[in-house]
């Protein structure tokens, strides 16, 4: 999943080796909050780039490296510059070199250590929760587990932006969820009952009856679906999300992640004869990538158009989710 604002894993050399003279660090004191740290650092070096923020990272080790280098840089003229030993003291860790081992990938963080690291960096409660999810994602070896933690991390970030007002609550409520998209397409499936319990069975228990009922009512109230007052039949009234303008990227990413997560479930739930999962790992030039990207978009639009025309006269047998994925693996 691409995120241009996030700093990804790098193989650049670790810097600032451990200084023997600093091994005897002072006893740990309560770590100041991140806002207090930032204020002090800005006063020390006006115009200094803002301290690394956990919300901008997908790699917790890179976040730790950037945090350490940042503290190292702004304290280089101090009598006692920031060091691995100082960090360990703040985290109440006996090993003065532990942070370096974590950054280099030679050690993993336990749940207890995650809390100690967050305290040493002065992270807020919300940022500590986000750091914990970032670590769980980064240390998971099983692809399914990594996907689960990445989904949780993205949901946490969306919730934080909603609480802070960065994402408008009214805008959020207008964005269709994965349930909404499936219900909208379900109108084109034959012999479907929109009674909540029947819907739950149709969707193979992927959502509760209450969630489905609320989603149907939301679609009707928004004018995307219409209910015949005499027959009770549910029909499409207008295109779902006719305009995607001004939709926050975080919300689009959340929806796409949810739809792709359904694909992961299908991988383990459905027989190979009921799905088609293919993959190809390719080394492409920039031009080849752009051409392939264009072709995939063209295929998706053509499929949507052709199937949409057919659904005007006939009903489908089942609702399928088509995910086209093309993303970089290497730098």
Image (cartoon, rainbow, N blue to C red):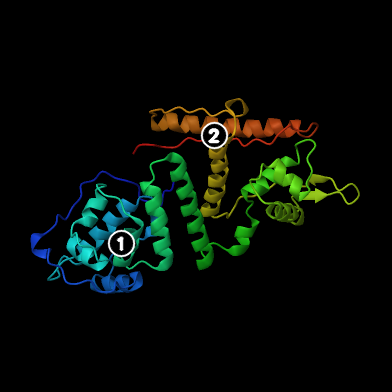
Residue 151 in sight from this viewpoint: yes
Residue in the image at 20% along x and 62% along y: 94
Q: Distance between the residues labelled 1 and 2?
A: 36 Å
The residue furthest right is 230
Disc 1 target residue = 117
The residue furthest top is 273
For this view, does 210 lie left or right of residue 246? right
Q: What element carries label 1?
A: helix
Residue 192: where, in percent of width, then height? 78, 40
Q: What element carries label 2?
A: helix
Of 272 and 72, nearer the camera is 272
The mark total stands at 2
For this view, does 37 lie left or right of residue 14? right
Residue 128: where, in percent of width, then height? 39, 63
Tell me which numbered mark, 1 or 2, is placed earlier along the sequence. Answer: 1
> Which of the 4 image quarters holds residue 100?
bottom left
Mark linked to residue 212: none
For this view, does 287 lie left or right of residue 183? left
Identify whether 53 is placed above or below 256. Answer: below
> Which of the 4 image quarters holds residue 217?
bottom right
Disc 2 target residue = 267
Residue 215: where, in percent of width, then height? 70, 53
Of 331 and 192, nearer the camera is 192
> Which of the 4 image quarters holds residue 175?
bottom right
């Amino acid at each position: 999943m691409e995120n241009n604002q996030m700093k990804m894993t790098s193989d650049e050399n670790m810097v600032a080796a451990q200084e023997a003279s600093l091994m005897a660090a002072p006893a740990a004191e309560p770590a100041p909050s991140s806002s207090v740290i930032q204020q002090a650092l800005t006063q020390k070096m006006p115009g200094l780039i803002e301290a690394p923020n956990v919300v901008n990272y997908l790699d917790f080790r890179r976040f730790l490296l950037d945090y350490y280098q940042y503290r190292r840089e702004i304290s280089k003229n101090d009598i006692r510059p920031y060091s691995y030993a100082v960090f360990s003291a703040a985290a109440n860790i006996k090993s003065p070199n532990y942070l370096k081992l974590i950054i280099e990938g030679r050690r993993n963080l336990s749940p207890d250590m995650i809390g100690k690291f967050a305290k040493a960096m002065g992270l807020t409660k919300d940022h500590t929760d986000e750091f914990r999810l970032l670590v769980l994602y980064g240390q998971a070896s099983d692809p399914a587990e990594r996907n689960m933690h990445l989904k949780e991390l993205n949901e946490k970030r969306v919730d934080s932006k909603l609480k802070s007002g960065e994402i408008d609550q009214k805008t959020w409520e207008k964005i269709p969820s994965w349930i909404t998209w499936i219900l909208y397409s379900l109108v084109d499936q034959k012999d479907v009952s929109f009674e909540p319990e029947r819907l739950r069975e149709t969707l193979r228990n992927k959502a509760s009856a209450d969630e489905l009922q609320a989603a149907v009512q939301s679609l009707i109230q928004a004018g995307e679906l219409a209910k015949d007052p005499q027959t009770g039949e549910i029909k499409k009234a207008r295109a779902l999300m006719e305009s995607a303008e001004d939709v926050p990227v975080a919300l689009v990413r959340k929806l796409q992640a949810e739809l792709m997560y359904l694909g992961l479930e299908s991988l383990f739930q459905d027989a190979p004869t009921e799905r088609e999962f293919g993959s190809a790992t390719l080394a492409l030039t920039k031009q080849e990538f752009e051409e392939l990207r264009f072709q995939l978009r063209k295929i998706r639009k053509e499929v949507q158009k052709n199937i949409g025309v057919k659904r005007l006269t006939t009903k489908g047998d089942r609702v399928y989710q088509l995910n086209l994925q093309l993303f970089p693996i290497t730098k």
